[in-house]
Amino acid sequence: HDVGMCALRLGCHFVVETLAHAKDKSLLPEWVRMLQMWLHRSPVACRWFLLQSEAAGWVRSLLLACTVSEMREKFAQLLLHAAAVLRPLELHLYPIAPLLPDTAPPVVVVTTSLSGSLEGTDEEEGEEEEEAEDMDAEESTDKDEV
């Protein structure tokens, strides 16, 4: 194994398993900066860190269970840094399918009238209003018959 990779692994284990549980976390920012430098130099190290974080339960324990906000933030910074280094190298592994025309979300244009009220220009809106008026008319005739 590469000496730099061994140093990164030891540093990560120290931060997650020792410093994270220490009362004095004053060295945390310095350790995170150092780990980010090592991660920046090696996509292999980034891949290891992300996989190890999930496999060892670091993500759950440091992002979800940890009550120390500084530790959560710094660990999240490390995860995001590793992902940012890997992104350009692995983007081709995650193809994005284009939206098909019939699956595209409907577009609603909203304008304001001179009185300041909002008016929707969606075609279906007028149909919905007519249906609501028809239902109101039916209810009132039902009440008259009783």
Image (spheres, rainbow, N blue to C red):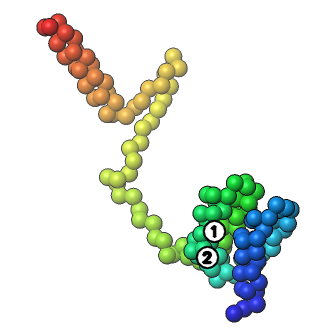
Compared to residue 135, the image places residue 111 above or below, namely below
Q: Secondary structure at mark 2?
A: helix
Image mark for residue 52:
2
| Among the 4 quarters of the image, the one containing residue 77 | bottom right
Compared to residue 72, the image places residue 32 above or below, namely below
N-terminal of the pair, mark 1 or mark 2, is 2
Q: Do we see residue 41 in this rendering?
A: no
| Among the 4 quarters of the image, the one containing residue 55 | bottom right
Q: Position of residue 142 (x, y in %)?
A: 17, 12
Sort mark 2 into few (<14), some (14-19) or many (20+) by Cα contacts within 10 Å: some
- Identified at 70% across, 67% down, the residue is 78
Q: Position of residue 104 (x, y in %)?
A: 38, 51
- Identified at 22% across, 11% down, the residue is 140
Callout 1 amino acid? Trp
Callout 2 amino acid? Gln
Q: Position of residue 106 (x, y in %)?
A: 38, 44
Which of the pair 76/67 is nearer the observer?
A: 67
- Identified at 76% across, 90% down, the residue is 3
- Give me the C-alpha separation between circle 1 and circle 2: 8 Å
- Identified at 51% across, 75% down, the residue is 92
Sort mark 1 into few (<14), some (14-19) or many (20+) by Cα contacts within 10 Å: some
Judged from this view, the residue extending furthest toward the left is 145
Write down the residue under mark 1: 58
Q: Secondary structure at mark 1?
A: helix
Give the position of the N terminus as an image quadrant.
bottom right
Compared to residue 102, the image places residue 89 above or below, namely below
| Among the 4 quarters of the image, the one containing residue 87 | bottom right
Q: Position of residue 36 (x, y in %)?
A: 75, 72
